Image: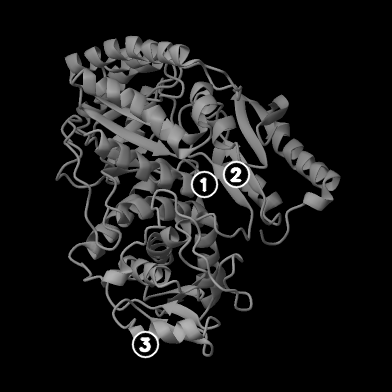
Amino acid sequence: MNLFNYRRRLSHIVRIGDTPLGGPEPIRVQSMTNTSTMDTAASVQQVLRIADAGGEYVRLTTQGTREAENMREINVGVRQAGCNVPLVADVHFNPRVADVAAAYCEKVRINPGNYVDAARQFKHLEYTDEEYQAELKKIEERLIPFLQICRKHNTAVRIGVNHGSLSDRIMSRYGDTPEGIVESCMEFLRICIREQFTDVVISIKASNTVVMVQSMRLLVTRMTQEGMSFPVHLGVTEAGEGEDGRIKSAVGIGALLQDGIGDTIRVSLSEAPEKEIPVARFLVDYVTSYRKGADLPIPMDAQAPPTYDWLKPVRRQSTRVGEIGGGQVPVVLDEIPVAGAISANPFNFTPETAEFLRKHPEVIVVSHPQTTNRLGEHRALALSLMNLGLENPLLIYQEYAEENLEHLQLKAAADTGVLFIEGLADGLILQNHAGGISVEVVRDLAYGILQAARARFTKTEYISCPGCGRTLYDLEGTIARIKAATSHLKGLKIAIMGCIVNGPGEMADADYGYVGAARGKVSLYKQKDCIEKNIPEEEAVERLLRFIEEDLKKNENKQPTKEQ
């Protein structure tokens, strides 16, 4: 990886209907329907709306063989309407469903966590090496016939790993780690290679942006080591809705796009699926346009030091100066400090500057980029400080001139969030020089970026799925009610999940969870433990709120503070 200059990773081309993916093809954007796959008319109309908005692939849930078989009718309806957008069947738990769907769709998504392995029960299992190999053999015996069906019908495959649905087998050997997530994927890819089946796309998704970024970087590294060039799909799963969902998606997806990783993306919002497309398209166009042709001649002392590992970055050590640095949570400032700070960039960072900073560890360095390659400059300056053994606190300064708030949110999150995922900075200064967006709004954006990067928590975090045909209740209405009642609980994480498929897993690090259990029924969770099952939907929100209130009272000493 080039840490400073943009280079899109070269993957091979995958045939997906009339819209190929990877290689020199443009980065594609996609979404997923939230209609019942058995409702042909509603599904066709939603596919058309997504395509009209610019979506280039559309995924539909196929939880059973009936839904998989009905994909034939949906495909016919879409083609009769004059739309050629490829359709993707989303399969969980039942390999037979994938076999059926492969005949009627341009691509089938399978989840290694529950394709052959038993559904996750959060149990620690012990395997000998021989037993583990026997489990891998089971996967191979089931996957090969599916690949043969796909080959027959010219159907592509997406191997989609979700952080929340790793199998107990993988968890028992690797733990809840990027290594486990990647190995779950590689097991399937190695079989595809042996079978010479290369029309495969890979995705690794997580609601935690740090896990997502580290896992995808590791996957690309492992694939390169094993001579693989499969294209990849990016997404922050269960990102939520509104500005929080957009900021979180831009931090995670933007970080990887800036790395040159990603051949297709989905911005997963708990909103109408067609609303995802403009957000995704803007993000792709922004990153690829401003980074192309913006190469930096990086000074030698800006190269990554031996102690820096882009796969497992740790926070840069810095001296504490007041409330800044020294391992404290990153700060947000409205402007560059007028005293006790110097502005710098890789081009004016002279030996004299370095010597001054060495003598004055109390001086704060403000990274103030001078070119359009903002991320490259910020990284280069941070790594220069590390190479020279300088522990002065580092603030990231970024300025814009945006009149559109959503565009400002997406740009700033994509530009700066990754620096805090990588632990390179001690604070963030955002300024916007166009009218109509207040200083207060810009400040809130900076705090939102830090929270999305898991660097500082200043408000309630909501982990909510985007909804699909499996969703068992009014998702958007429920999110609004829960947010209205809990937004004052700073630092608390609440998960709102439409169904059980990713629910308990993806929300494993949430404090409390609200999960669709059956039509009209909801189960409540405290972390990984189900505390109430199959509550009538009309009672569930109030029961959740009551439980949170009672639980916090029991543990007042553990109650979330204003900032964590």
State which mark lies toward you, 2 or 3. Answer: 3
Determine whether, in the image, residue 426 is placed left or right of residue 1: right
State which mark lies toward you, 1 or 3. Answer: 3
State which mark lies toward you, 1 or 2. Answer: 1
User: Mark 1: which secondary structure?
Assistant: loop
- Position of the C terminus, as image quadrant, is bottom right
Spatial CA distance of label 2 from label 3 is 55 Å
Residue type at tag 2: Ile
Q: Nearer the viewer, residue 119 or 351?
A: 351
Q: Residue furthest bottom?
A: 339
Which residue is denoted by mark 2 in the rendering? 479
Spatial CA distance of label 1 from label 3 is 48 Å
Q: Quadrant of residue 44?
A: top left
Q: State whether residue 122 is above or below residue 50.
A: above
Residue 410, image x and y in percent? 40, 60
Query: Residue at 44% of width from left, 21% of height from top?
Result: 92
Spatial CA distance of label 1 from label 2 is 9 Å
Query: Residue at 44% of width from left, 79% of height from top?
Result: 366
Q: Which mark is residue 13?
A: none
Which residue is denoted by mark 1 in the rendering? 240
User: Mark 2: which secondary structure?
Assistant: helix
User: Mark 3: which secondary structure?
Assistant: helix
Question: Pointer 1 and pointer 2: residues touching (CB < 8 Å)?
Answer: yes
Q: State whether residue 435 is above or below residue 196.
A: below
Residue type at tag 3: Glu
Q: Residue furthest right?
A: 554
Residue 406, image x and y in percent? 42, 62
Q: Which mark is residue 352?
A: 3
